[in-house]
């Protein structure tokens, strides 16, 4: 069953089922138009579609409460032998109702890629010219060394000052990076590092090919970056995304993580539909790190900031985007440099009533793989939220 406002989602589900070659099912679409809360129209339209002889099944997980109740009733009146099921978001099991008995519960063997999952939820796509990364492109030790910088408050502040006064002043125009063509004009100009603490200078020399007193973008690019823009982005903070992805890779086998990636730039088809604009003009949103277990999305937002306000904003937005891309079962975490992550976590949990949100702060960075492991285990527990 679908309405005018969920027609696109209906198409996505149909297409997704057709692509599952091992699933043989006859889909019977029922268009409720604008009557998603009208008992008469729901019952009338459903009963007209109920076959007399074929096996019938209704999964009543989604939709309005009225749709679930009246569709269930309408089918049961015509076919009391029908199968009725729902997806329990707490246990992630399919529950099949049985009259006068407990429902049967089954694990969901379905495994999806991140691309399949995003497409299933309102036909979301990532940008073709800037696809996500499924492997960190630099050795683990480099991001780990930056974690060491940010684990020390004084070193972190010195680095942020250098970013603002030295890197940004040359490579940014307002809030945005200069175009690649413009960055090439300054690539041979060294950016001074001589006022940075010795610890940071040693890391830059060893890991990013800096000289004793300066860092050159074109030389650093040879470390494995695809562009000068990517060099700037990495220095500015996407190193944290790389580090988070590396930590997830360490526990992939233990939790049967099908796929993990970073730097998702997502097209927003809903915005396009409402505003009738082209893909080229369309705004997009970014998703830092994500991984998938079975069909459940785990989304992680990353920021090197310790600002309470910014961290809350990042986590709240990530929660909304995760639900948009992964449905109600999606889980969200924030990796940041806050010294009071528990405070942020409690505030967000109170606002959105999601008990399984997690905030990792500065002190969690060194053993982030262990923290993510605990978070996954928490989500395997059958509790509300």
Image: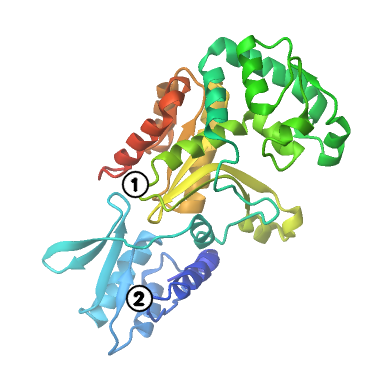
In the figure, 152 relative to 268: above or below? above
Residue 232 location (% of width, % of height): 72, 32
In this view, the residue farthest toward the bottom is 53
Q: Which residue is mark 1?
A: 255
| Residue 250, quarter of picture | top left
Q: Which mark is residue 43?
A: 2
- Above or below, 185 against 61 in this view is above
Residue 82 in the image: above or below residue 117: below
The CA span between labels 2 and 1 is 43 Å
Q: Position of residue 179 (x, y in %)?
A: 82, 39
Q: Residue at x 59, y 47 (%)?
A: 133
Residue at (66% x, 58% y) in the render: 274
Indicate the quadrant where residue 372 lies. top left
Image position, residue 43 (x, y; %): 35, 75
Q: Residue furthest right?
A: 185
Which of the image's four quarters has the C terminus?
top left
For image coordinates 73% across by 35% down, the residue present is: 221
Q: Is residue 201 visible?
A: yes
Marks 2 and 1 in Cβ contact (< 8 Å): no
Q: Which residue is at the front of the view, 357 or 42?
A: 357
| Residue 216 figure quarter | top right
SS class of the residue under badge 1? loop
307 sits left or right of 381 in the view: right
Please say which color scheme the image uses: rainbow
């Amino acid at each position: 069953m679908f309405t005018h406002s969920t027609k696109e989602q209906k198409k996505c589900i149909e297409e997704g089922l057709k692509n599952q070659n091992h699933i043989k099912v006859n889909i019977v679409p029922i268009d409720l138009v604008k009557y998603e809360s009208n008992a008469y129209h729901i019952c009338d339209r459903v009963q007209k579609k109920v076959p007399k002889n074929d096996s019938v099944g209704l999964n009543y997980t989604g939709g309005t409460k009225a749709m679930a109740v009246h569709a269930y009733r309408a089918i049961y009146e015509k076919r009391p032998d029908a199968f009725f099921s729902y997806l329990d978001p707490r246990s992630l099991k399919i529950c099949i109702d049985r009259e006068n008995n407990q429902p049967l519960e089954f694990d969901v063997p379905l495994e999806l890629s991140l691309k399949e999952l995003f497409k299933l939820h309102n036909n979301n796509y990532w940008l073709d010219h800037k696809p996500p990364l499924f492997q960190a492109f630099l050795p683990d030790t480099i991001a780990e060394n930056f974690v060491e910088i940010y684990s020390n408050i004084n070193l972190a502040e010195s680095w942020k000052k250098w970013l603002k006064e030295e890197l940004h002043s040359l490579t940014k125009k307002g809030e945005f990076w200069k175009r690649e063509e413009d960055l090439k004009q300054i690539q041979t100009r060294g950016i001074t590092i001589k006022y940075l603490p010795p610890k940071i200078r040693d890391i830059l020399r060893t890991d990013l090919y800096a000289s004793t007193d300066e860092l050159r973008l074109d030389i650093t690019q040879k470390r494995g970056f695809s562009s000068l823009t990517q060099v700037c982005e990495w220095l500015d903070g996407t190193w944290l995304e790389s580090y988070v992805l590396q930590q997830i890779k360490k526990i992939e086998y233990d939790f049967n993580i099908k796929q993990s990636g970073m730097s998702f730039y997502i097209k927003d088809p809903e915005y396009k539909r409402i505003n009738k604009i082209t893909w080229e003009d369309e705004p997009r949103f970014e998703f830092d790190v994500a991984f998938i277990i079975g069909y459940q999305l785990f989304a992680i937002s990353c920021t090197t900031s310790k600002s309470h306000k910014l961290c809350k904003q990042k986590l709240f937005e990530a929660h909304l985007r995760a639900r948009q891309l992964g449905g109600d079962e999606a889980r969200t975490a924030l990796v940041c440099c806050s010294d009071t992550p528990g405070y942020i976590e409690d505030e967000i949990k109170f606002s959105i009533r999601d008990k399984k949100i997690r905030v990792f702060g500065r002190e969690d960075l060194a053993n982030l793989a262990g923290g993510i492991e605990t978070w996954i285990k928490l989500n395997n527990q059958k509790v509300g939220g």
